[in-house]
Amino acid sequence: MVLRKAGTAAAAAGVVAIGFIGLVTMGTYAASGTPQQSANRSALSPGTVPAAYQEAIQTWGSLCSAISPPMLAAQLYQESGFDPRARSGVGAEGMAQFMPGTWAMYGTDANGDGRKDVWDPYDAIASAAVYDCALAKDVANVPGDPQANVLAAYNAGPYAVTRNGGIPPYRETQGYVRNIQAMARSFAAPASPTAPLEVSAQSAAAIYFAQTKLGTPYLWGGEGLPSQNGRFDCSGLTQAAFASVGIELPRVANDQWYAGPHPSRDQLRPGDLVFWATDLSDPRSIHHVGIYVGGGYMINAPHTGAVIRYDKIDTREYIGATRVTSDGAQALPTRNNEGAVNAPSRPGSTAPAAPAGAQGGAPAVAAAPPVPAGPSPAAPGR
């Protein structure tokens, strides 16, 4: 928070065996506060943020050179899971989790409706960027990675960064910087459509774990516990498979989506997680996950009444894939019992010296569409 706040198994196995053996910008912060686009700004990878927010995050994430759209997306996801209605137990509000006093200083009317509304996602997205760039001015003379210094100031306060000449020696702050920068890689578009992604060293063992569960009956909410007779649902299976190789994934499928970069369909390799959604423009609607094993097939726990099995991946609701990385998985936020993201805590005040660049509010961007309700993030799988 901001303290400023279904083919047959036999046929599939043959195809899978072949596949498995074969592979086992910089923008500027103008005086007016207007976001500036530049050719070398990092772009968002399509499908990683709700489509309704893609343009706003891309635009405001280019507000100053110390931030980027993937970094801004990672912050918003870490804070609220892109939930514009999020409210924390200490009073932080909205998608960017601003405290009321900080919102009074940095709240921005991004959609031009004449109000600075913390519950409006477009105002919240813009205000998070305005606040980041104000922090960037406060720590502009600190040596090191400018983006890392901004993130450290966001977490621990700009004075702590300037006093320490960089990221302060606080475990929480160091973890916050590391996690946001790791998560940003999940939101970043590749340098080119054909850019290769490193294959996970743990993928073969994760697949092996899933193969040992073939034929096990599906159980909604199943995590393979003895009390559940070793049964799984879809995300319970993938979570357990990667836990077997020392990687802790979150419990629900639409959080697992952010555990690493996103290979294209022709870049898929065994061990990648593959996902399905009811709305291909909104990753919050992801409802199913499996483990790709090659040849166009996955191992998955499909639904009640079925068993863990091989299935084809090329179906209508396929939204994409994630190549799990250890640091990507470690960076993901946790959720409470109601399914809401637990925003990171803050060890100290983070208020910049002055609301730099925010006087009078930043200029409006295009009028925003209504806030999409989005599906509940709490469902573990189909």
Image (cartoon, rainbow, N blue to C red):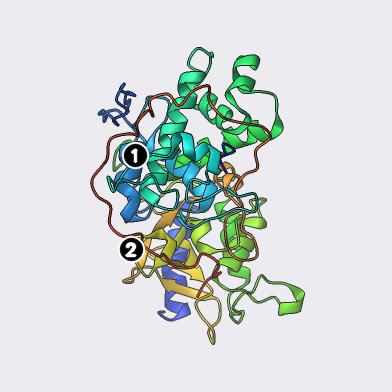
Q: Position of residue 302 (x, y in %)?
A: 50, 77
21 vs 179, left or right, is: left
Q: Nearer the viewer, residue 222 or 246?
A: 222
**Which amino acid lies under the numbered mark 1 shown in the image of this protein?**
Ala
Residue drawn at (60%, 53%) of the image: 88
Residue 90 versus residue 347: which sits nearer the camera? Answer: 90
Q: In this view, does 50 lie above or below 107?
A: below
353 sits to left or right of 265: right
Residue under the point 29% across and 28% down = 40
- The amino acid sitting under disc 2 is Leu
Mark seen at residue 231: none
Q: For the N terminus, give its image quadrant.
A: top right
Q: Name the residue under label 1.
A: 195
Left or right? Give the position of 380 relative to 9. Answer: right
Q: Can residue 352 be seen in this view?
A: yes
For the point 28% across and 48% down, the residue is 113
Q: Position of residue 256 (x, y in %)?
A: 52, 57
Mark 2 crowd level (few <14, some 14–19, many ≥20, 10 Å Cα):
some
Residue linked to disc 2: 280
Please tell me in which quadrant of the rendered image residue 41 appears: top left
- Look at the numbered disc 2 and give the secondary structure of its residue: loop
Marks 2 and 1, the one that precedes in the sequence: 1
Residue beneath the point at 54% across and 43% down = 100
Q: Give above or below for 213 relative to 322.
A: below
What element does badge 1 sit on? loop
- The reply to whether residue 259 is in sight is no
Residue furthest out toward the right = 226
Distance of mark 2 from mark 1, alpha carbons? 23 Å
